[in-house]
Image (cartoon, helix red, strand yellow):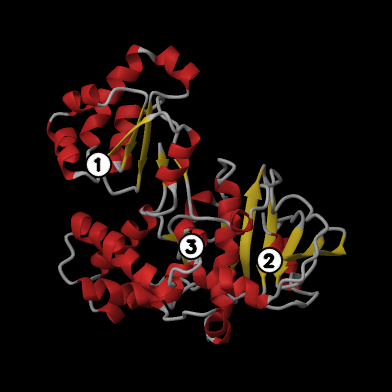
Amino acid sequence: MLTGPRQAGKTTLLRHTEPNRSFVTLDDLEVRSLAQKDPKTFLERFPPPVLIDEFQYAPEILPYIKIRVDEKRTKLIDAGGDYWLTGSQNFSMMKKVSESLAGRVTILNLLGLSRKEINGEPPDDRDFIATPAPAFETERSIDDIFQFIVRGDKPELWANRDIDTEIYYRSYVQTYIERDVVSQLKVKDIGLFEKFMRLLAGRIGQLLNLASLAGDVEVSLPTIKSWITLLERSFQIMLLPPYFRNIGKRSVKTQKIYFLDTGLACYFLKLGTSQSAYASHIAGGLFENWVISEIVKSYWYKGLAANLYFWRTKEGTETDIIYETEGKIYPVEIKLASSPPRKTFTSLEKIAKSSGLEFERKKIICTSKSNLPLDAKTEIVSALSIT
């Protein structure tokens, strides 16, 4: 099962991977109706191996797929799967997948294009944060970075550079996001939801204050919570939790908000060019957002969890990313500057020492044109070298 945001290239990727596999999409209302009302006949009409696109519209097929999988489970492993499913998550879909296909399905997440994919560069299997940065030099500038930020990560926008981003994202919002909102949450005032999205984009990289957001949008707190949940589950936003040694606290404390596609955020902020985005008051937040989304992609594309957190003390000292793996902790600072301060981690190290924490390798990701070591465990990393 391949999930991810709409228009990320899920169907195109799978059809390219195995072009001879039969294909059916539940965007077709007649086919969708058959799958919903008579899933057994639907599966007989579209026998495996088959790619079922937008399957979240008919979760009724899942128990019947389970039966067929169990009947020939050994053969499925050898064949790479009789059923390939693509879809954008909704509230009930993942629960039904867990109930029907537990132990029988591999779930992969696909986001939009990374910088490396856009540039046609080969992937890197390294753990980006935990391993030393390789030698790197570039002649590209801050403007190049903000072109990535403003244009976003949707494959169609990079396959056809003549597409106007404002027209594309306006259609994307109207066709996909609003349709999901209406169908899943029964939102009647789409104008209020768009206002909510604009305000959310303006809070990129900030602590998510739901009560304040509800007051500004003029809707109830439960409504804001349901909208946030929808956006997160449909891969439009990500919530970065704070780091605590007590794991249980990470999910209940205030989180920070980021868009998984900075192009969508720029659309709601009415920033249509790299120059306007770089000159805006939110330039630092957009840069931080883009770096974090690139890092998330670098792990998801390897099938790994991105164990990312932020660290904020009661006194207000903050570190943009805390990455945890194999019991080790790696801090990362993100700076919209070509030469960040060398003492970036001084305050953090003092707090860590008093708390009994030890850091491994530290990174400062910035707009430098090269990767440079500062000392044995600290390095400056160009944002254009993110893998």
Residue at position x 87%, y 63% in the image: 375
Residue 285 vs 23, above or below: the answer is below
- Location of mark 2 (residue): 383
Residue 368 picture quarter? bottom right
Tag 3 secondary structure:
loop
Mark before the other along the chain sequence, 1 or 3 = 1
Q: Is residue 183 left or right of residue 126?
A: left
The residue lying toward the viewer, choosing from 351 and 17, is 17
Q: Are marks 2 and 3 in contact (CB under 8 Å)?
A: no
Tag 2 secondary structure:
helix
Residue 141 vs 322, above or below: the answer is below
Q: Are marks 1 and 3 in contact (CB under 8 Å)?
A: no
Q: Which mark is residue 26?
A: 1
Q: Does the image show residue 243?
A: no
How many angstroms separate mark 2 from mark 1 (CA)? Answer: 40 Å
Mark before the other along the chain sequence, 2 or 1 = 1
**Residue farthest along the right direction in this orientation:** 376
Q: Are marks 2 and 1 in contact (CB under 8 Å)?
A: no
Q: Give neighbour class at mark 2: few <14, some 14-19, many 20+ (Cα, 10 Å).
A: many
Q: Position of residue 4 (x, y in %)?
A: 42, 49
